[in-house]
Image (cartoon, coloured by chain):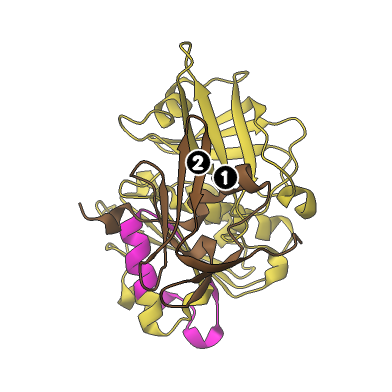
Chain colours: A brown, B yellow
Amino acid sequence: MDDTSLRLDGNALGGEFQEIFAQELTSARVQCGHCGKVEPIGAEHVYMHAPGSVVRCRHCESVLMVIVQGPSGYRLAFHGCTWLDIPHEA
Amino acid sequence: VARAAVLGRLNWRLGEVVEITDETSRVRSIAFHVPEWPGHRPGQHVDVRLTAEDGYQAQRSYSIASPPEDQRLILTVERIPDGEVSPYLVDELIVGDQIEIRGPIGGYFVWEAKMGGPLLLVAGGSGVVPLMAMVRHRAAVSSMVPTRLVYSSRSLDDVIYRDELDRLGGDNDGFEVIHTLTRVQPPDWTGYNRRVDSQMLTEVAFPPSATPAVFICGPTPLVESVAGALTLLGHEPKRVKTERFGPTGG
């Protein structure tokens, strides 16, 4: 089985993000640091079968974010995004 | 309600089972009373957490099947063989039981009547659940938004919400259901009998020129293939929202 069949959407991380940021984040837009495309997090590709979750750009599959939960808390690596645009909640 | 639904930190709440409905041999709907539930939007999901006597916890996400207009929170769950959570929910849970639920979660894979249409929904198996919340919401607010649900099931017995979909589809209010049965068909079946493909979408989906809002939910291979076909037909990718279940679905 290749990774494609394990692919999920940014939606799948909605609960984790809301736990960490106390805010709905699947509608927040993110710019890929590699190809420059902008998408809502909910539209990006997510892989959750490894320890931690990996968010990849739906256009170029570059890693945007890595989220790992350990015994002492979360570690978030956002090294693949240029920016994250979080709207005021409606 | 919508404002309350998106604000604030997620809290685990105890939901009490108030009604259980068998949908198919592998799928049941569970209605909960959740005290101080903040309300939700059609398409959102919740997390469910089970705790064993030894403290071991297992957590899964389930789509909400009920519309915001329903006082109860309804989850429709498919039993995944060897699953950690779904066999308990489908086979063991009884009315009066309490389990931990948090939500609602998500804001991207959401449709409300005020967002307009036309609305194209494509479901594979239990991927119909969040789309049903949209269909029920549409009916609850008497929306006339032209809506088509293309629904792929293995057999007629595997079709979730069959009677309700038949009824809603017969109302002549702009809602249509197009079934396809991929493995077993009744002898008198005149509908589709194959996986959702480009030809089928050309025949039954709104054309790209109608700029429909599209929501696809189901096992990852179905979602990938339908989203790809719609893009090739000319639908703008940003109008095509997907929710993948992973390799097995549910």
Residue under the point 69% across and 37% down: B72
Q: Residue furthest left?
A: A1
Residue B111 horizontal side relative to residue B58, left or right: right
Q: Which quadrant: the C terminus of chain A?
A: bottom right
Tags 2 and 1 in contact by the CB under 8 Å rule?
yes
**Residue of label 1:** A15
Say what secondary structure mark 2 lies in. strand
- Mark 2 is surrounded, within 10 Å at the Cα level, by few (under 14), some (14 to 19) or many (20 or more) other residues, namely many
Residue type of the residue flagged with mark 1: Gly
The chain containing the residue under callout 2 comes to B
Residue B64 visible somewhere in the drawing: no
Q: Quadrant of residue B43?
A: bottom right
Residue under the point 43% across and 29% down: B85
**Residue of label 2:** B61
Instruction: Give above or below for B166 relative to B80.
Output: below
Residue B32: say if magenta. no
Which residues fall within the magenta stretch?
A: B203-228
